[in-house]
Amino acid sequence: MKIQKDSPKVLILVVCSRNYLSYVASKTQKKIWKNNNNFKIVHYTGDNNLDFKELDYIGNNSNEYLYVNASNDYKNIALKTLLAFEEVYKHFEFDYIFRTNTSSFINLRKLKTYIDENKKHLDFSGIVIDTKQKIKIASGAGFFISRKNIELILNNKKKFDTNFPDDVAVAKLLKEYNIIPKNTIRKDLNETITPKDLIEVLKPKDLLDSDHFHYRCRLDPHFHRILEPLLFKYMNLVFKLNSKILNNILYSGIFIIFKLSNLKYLRKIIQKYYSFKFYGEIQFRNFLLYSKNK
C-alpha cells in the first residue's frame, strides 16, 4: 500500500507498563506491525534507573522501547506520557501522534484509510468522555494529537497536571486554549459487553465489514487478560488472510479457546504459566548478567 503524497505523517505512540500482561501484549503488537511501511511505531515505558537497563525485563531488546525517567505506577502515567512527547518531538518527524496502549488492536490499513478521510479531525480527537472534572477528554485508549498541540503542551509544561491520568491532563491543558476533542470511532471488547456478544463481534465477516480501525481488547472481567495477545493474532490473521474458509476455521479455534479458558482450573494454569514465563525470564537474564560480570 503506497502512501498518498498529501497523506499526513502519523506516529503511533504506545504506552506500556512493567507487568507480564503488558509485556506479552507489546511483544505481540511489535510482531504484527513489524513489516508495516506507513507508520513509525514507538512503545514507551518508564525506568527510574536509566543506567541499569540490562536488569530490565526487556533485556536485550531494550533498544526496541523508548525509556523515560519515570516510574511505571499508573499514577505517573501523565508524567511518563509528557516525557515521551518530549522525546518523540525532538527525534521524529510527524504531523500527528496516535497515542494508544497495549490492550488495543490497531488495523493499520483501516487506520490509514481513516486518517486520509478525516484529516480535519486529527488535531485532537478520540472517544470523547465527560469527566468528573467537567472536562471533555479524548479517551487514553487511543487519541490523535497534532504536532502543533504537542508543541503547545511542551511549551506549557508547568500547566500540565500530572496528578491526573494523561488523557485528562492533555485535555485539561488544551481546554485552556479552547481546544476541545472531536469524536472518533472505536470498538470496545471490554466489560461493557457479555461473553456471548464478544464471540459474535469476533466473527470474521463482522470484522472485515467494519470500518473500525481500533479495537479496545481489554477482556476482564469475563476472560483472563492474557488472551488479549491471542486476540490480536486472531484479528490480524482474519484481516490478512481474507479467506472465508480459513477465517471460519480460525473463528472456530478462537471460539473453543475462549470457551475453555473460563474453566476454573484451566484459567489458573494459564495465569501461572505466563506469570512464571515472565518472571522466570527476568531472573534468568539477571543470573546470566551476574555470572558474566562476576
Image (cartoon, helix red, strand yellow):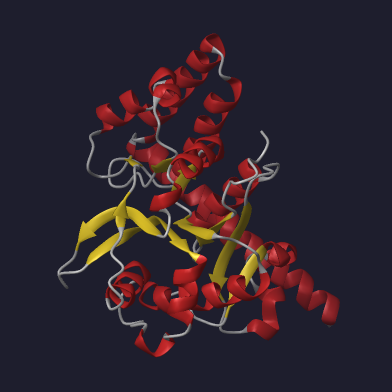
Q: Is residue 96 above or below residue 39?
A: below
Number of labels in the image equals: 0
Q: Is residue 50 left or right of residue 203?
A: right
Q: Is residue 244 left or right of residue 207?
A: right
Q: Is residue 85 above or below residue 104?
A: below
Decide which of 74, 123 is in the foreground and name it.
123
Q: Is residue 85 above or below residue 198?
A: below
* Residue at 54% across, 27% down: 239
Residue 137 picture location, percent across and down: 27, 63
Residue 18 visible (yes or no): no
Residue 259 picture location, percent across and down: 36, 27
Decide which of 81, 228 is in the foreground and name it.
81
Quarter of the image for residue 217 reads top left
* Residue at 42% across, 44% down: 118
Quarter of the image for residue 178 reads bottom left
Residue 262 visible (yes or no): yes
Q: Residue furthest front?
A: 6
Image quadrant in which the N terminus is located: top right
Image quadrant in which the C terminus is located: bottom right
Decide which of 49, 7 is in the foreground and name it.
7
Residue 160 picture location, percent across and down: 37, 82
Residue 92 picture location, percent across and down: 66, 67
* Residue at 36% across, 56% down: 125
Q: Is residue 189 left or right of residue 118?
A: left
Q: Residue furthest top?
A: 245
